[in-house]
Amino acid sequence: MAGVSFFAELRKRKVPQAAAIYGAVSWGVTEIIVTVVEQLFLPQWISTLAVIGFVVGFPVAMFLSWTFDLTSEGIQRTAVSSRRGTASIALSMLLLVAGTAGLFLLIKPSIQEPGQRSDAPEIMPNSVAVLPFENASQDAADSYLSEGLSDELRGQLGRVAELRIAARSSSVAAVERGMDAMAVSSSLAVAHLVEGSVRLQGNRLRVSVQLIEGRTGLALWSNTYHRSAKEFVNVQQNIADEIVRRILPGAKGVATAPATVDADANDLLLLAQHYEYEVRSRTQIDEDKLAKAVNLYRAATEADPTSALAFSRLARALLFLGDIESAEGAITQAMLIDPNLSEVQNTLGETYWARGLPAAAAAFERAVELDPDNADALANYAYQLWMTMGAKAPGNPRALDLYQRALDNDPLSLTRYAALGDYYGRQGHAAEVRPIIEDIEALFHSVEAYRAIDWLYELIGEVDHAIAWRLRARDLEPDNPDHNSRLAGLFALLGDAETALQLEPEPGIWVLYHLRRYDELIALAEFVMIEDPSDIDARYLLSFAHAASGNNDQAIRILGSTGLPDSVLEDRPRSASEVEAFQTLINALLGSDIPDANEAGLSLAQWQEDVPWWGDVGWIGLYRACNFANLGQRDTALEFLAKIKQSVRLRREPELRDLYCFRDYQDEPVYQSVVKDQEQRRAKLRQKLPATLREYGVELQAESRD
């Protein structure tokens, strides 16, 4: 038989033994090459070339094994032992070549991917990403030194106008994903990478650092510093200067000043920032750890009272803690020391924004001017422009451009994708939101990512998909009660009170709001305000519940405690919630019996119609209709009511049914058609939900969790 003859030839010519030996040798040599490349920071293409060489060499080795034999008399050609052996040679070689070609085609995409993507962003030669340094110490508590060194280098280099520095969050994410140098270079669109390690042993430091060419993975420069712990700032400065010299060889007199030159202040800043970033990276805020960061920052300002960045970071942490007054004092001191730092101007803008002061715009703009790659400043400025200019500015192109620039500089940051998606979603642009959802789904696999997708799906009216993604988040984090609360709110939005109350037997504020159970909402919100006076959203919902219940005077009093209407009149609304609260205030004033309240409400309604941020599409459309109704312009109000049916987002039933402005519209066919349209949407989504959950492979399990 042909098969017998063929395998007899294989055994005779010892081809199986040769294949086994070739495979073992190839594997071993490849492992050695990969290890050497990694340890000596050689280009990654060396490993790739070795693999290709062994794959291509396999058919050659098998051909030689088939054709020749190693004997005591030397290498001799093997004789064919059967008539069919000759035919088998041609067939076997054909199969061998075909199999090798198939293997090569299989690995070809991975060979090409790092540097040959046609849609890869342009990489500027003066661009660099500082990757997190490795903590080589035996004590994990020393990790703040390695983390801090990369953060401070990133900050120092970011203050060099001629350099483009990748954002922190994307640099950290790249390492967490295990990307090699070429993949990081492509993903972050940078030409150079900085990486290294820090080891603390007693009072001695060992800092290793490499500057790597992203295109090839080749180490352009490396050095190891052996210093005392007190010389850490000097090592940092030497590294920064050398990087600038290597990337900008023609630059003269480039300053790379650190945050502080005081060794004690530097150590305090690194440890404080370590705690602050730990808090910011988690969903639930650890106030004790945040307070520890604040105390360390304050100690750093005492150790070096000339450091503008120490005061700025103290202000930033205080803002996060909610102590706006103390933050204002700290950022004022930073501005007195050095106002020409992007980080200082950004924190100043955040402080002004928290205060509701119009000067926030100028501070954010200045922060972007000082560092066009500061992703935080870009995003803050975009949000400020969006809130103050609003939808009436055609597409608000400047805000959109800033959001896009923030994402371009921070392409592995979930926050940047979520912010851009929120911008599009609130304006009703579902077509722009969907690709962002797809990007988040492809790039991120975490509870935070699933939460972001959940919210974006709600914005475009696909609440069934929002529920599915929140269930995925709950599956990853089953012990977090926030997931059931959010799910209950979504079911209440759909009008499914039974499921909402199964998920949250003791309903929270949002469930009570959607179900229009205002008496219970008032009781719960008042308790929440006692427990957490800083919960502004609770105050807003409490005021709405009072106004919907006819307690307009109480609603006015509560909203006045939040700074309304002055905060909006002086600097436009600072959030979507404030827009909604401002609308509640106008309605409460118009429904109140307080002398001059009606006149004040009409004045605010007219002001709202005259300001440039007011729009007529997306989430804001209902308020336009309400505002025209309050101004007595019935036909225009009905026109805008009809537009609500064009919006993809599902409207909240309390707003449509219980705002004072629509009290005389209940019998209007247009109003009734809008109410019916929303009811039909909810019913359709409820009907569609089981199939959506099956599609995602998730189950509701509506019973509450302890």
Image (tube, grey):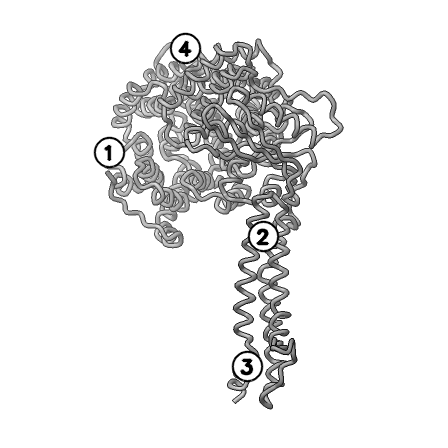
Residue under label 4: 596
Vertical arrangement, residue 496 with respect to residue 626, above or below: below
SS class, disc 1: loop
In the image, is 485 to the left or to the right of 353? left
Q: CA distance from mark 2 to mark 4?
A: 84 Å
Q: Which mark is residue 33?
A: 2
Vertical arrangement, residue 433 with respect to residue 397, above or below: below
In the image, is 591 to the left or to the right of 162? left
Q: CA distance from mark 2 to mark 1?
A: 62 Å
Viewer-proximal residue among 671 and 291: 291
SS class, disc 3: helix
Viewer-proximal residue among 65 and 303: 65
Q: CA distance from mark 2 to mark 3?
A: 34 Å
Vertical arrangement, residue 260 with respect to residue 98, above or below: above
Vertical arrangement, residue 498 with respect to residue 657, above or below: below
Crowd band around label 2 with a 10 angstrom C-alpha radius: few (<14), some (14–19), many (20+): some
In the image, is 294 to the left or to the right of 370? left
Q: Which mark is residue 506?
A: 1
Q: Which mark is residue 12?
A: 3
**In the rendering, at what x and y percent does residue 236 appear?**
58, 25
Q: CA distance from mark 4 to mark 3?
A: 108 Å
